[in-house]
Image (spheres, rainbow, N blue to C red):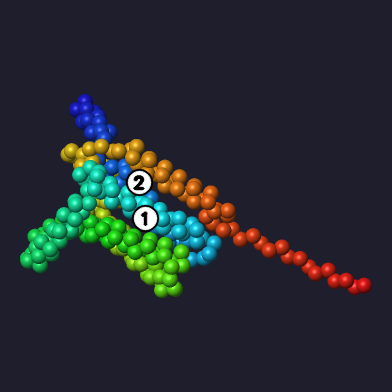
Amino acid sequence: MNTTMSTQATASAHMQPIPSRRVIDAPTRAFHWLFALCFLGAYLSADGERWRLLHVTLGYTLAGLLVFRLAYGMLGPRHVRLNLLLSKLSSGGTWLHSLWQARAVTDVNWRQGQNLLLALAVVVLLVTVVPVTLTGYASFNDWSGDWLGDLHEWTGEAFLWGVLVHLGAMLVFSLWRRKNLSMPMLTGRTEGRGPDLAQHNHGLLAWALVASVLTYWTWEWQQSPQGLIRWETPTALTSPIENND
């Protein structure tokens, strides 16, 4: 009898939901994935005249998303404020000093180092968008010679390396902590007890952001007679008719 009750109690404990708290709101997650999607699409469509309008449209979308993130970072809730990123970066000198003075690995606040590196990667990516989009706009409108195109290509490669560093850091820290650190960017929540860091999800703002991007893409598609992708039409092969008369 006692064994049965113990088994039922264990099963009931396993059926209880794992406590979690919201750490990332919906607009931030929507911005992140739209930003990643636009860069991936812009990078893959960088070569070839067929993809040029698609490449330019995605580049303009990156610029618009940056404007949204800056505005949200100044007017949004506390957990998305830009000064929060800057405060993490400002602690970099203190953390490096503590790393230098540490006598053992356990003396280092590695959680602070993780937050510092991830914040630095985010700031670098946001800043790099500016020269990428400006040089792309100037190159598309033929403002100068080929050097702008080369500069645009170089800044795009620099952005790619920033993305790879960001992904690599997420992978290393996830393995080190034995926890998927990218999951909160999908669900908005992380395991653990405590108050929500993001008290409100702001789902309507996230849907408005997605709708704005889709509306802009549709408008750009309608402005081009052939759409954003120029499909090459095969040239008809005609055989000359010789006149034997």
The front one of 242 and 67 is 67
Point out residue 130 in the picture as x, y percentages from the top left corner.
33, 61
**Mark count:** 2
Distance from the alpha carbon under mark 1 to that under mark 2: 15 Å
Residue type at mark 1: give it. Answer: Ala
Tell me the residue at 41%/65% (across/down).
138
- The quarter of the picture where the C terminus appears is bottom right
- The quarter of the picture where the N terminus appears is top left
Residue 201 placement, left or right of 41? left
N-terminal of the two: label 1 or label 2? 2
Q: Secondary structure at mark 1?
A: helix
Tell me the residue at 64%/60% (across/down).
233
Point out residue 135 in the picture as x, y percentages from the top left corner.
39, 65
Point out residue 183 in the picture as x, y percentages from the top left corner.
30, 48
Q: Is residue 92 above or below residue 184?
A: below
Point out residue 231 in the picture as x, y percentages from the top left corner.
59, 58
Q: Is residue 20 above or below residue 102?
A: above
Residue 244 placement, left or right of 11? right
Quadrant of the image occupied by residue 103: bottom left
Q: Which residue is mark 2?
A: 30
The front one of 130 and 55 is 130
How packed mark 2 is, by other alpha carbons closer than 10 Å (few <14, some 14-19, many 20 or more), is many
Q: Nearer the viewer, mark 1 or mark 2?
A: 1
The front one of 50 and 109 is 50
Residue 119 placement, left or right of 136? left
Residue type at mark 2: give it. Answer: Ala
Tell me the residue at 49%/48% (across/down).
219
Q: Is residue 118 above or below residue 23?
A: below
Label of residue 63 in the image = 1
Residue 172 visible somewhere in the drawing = no
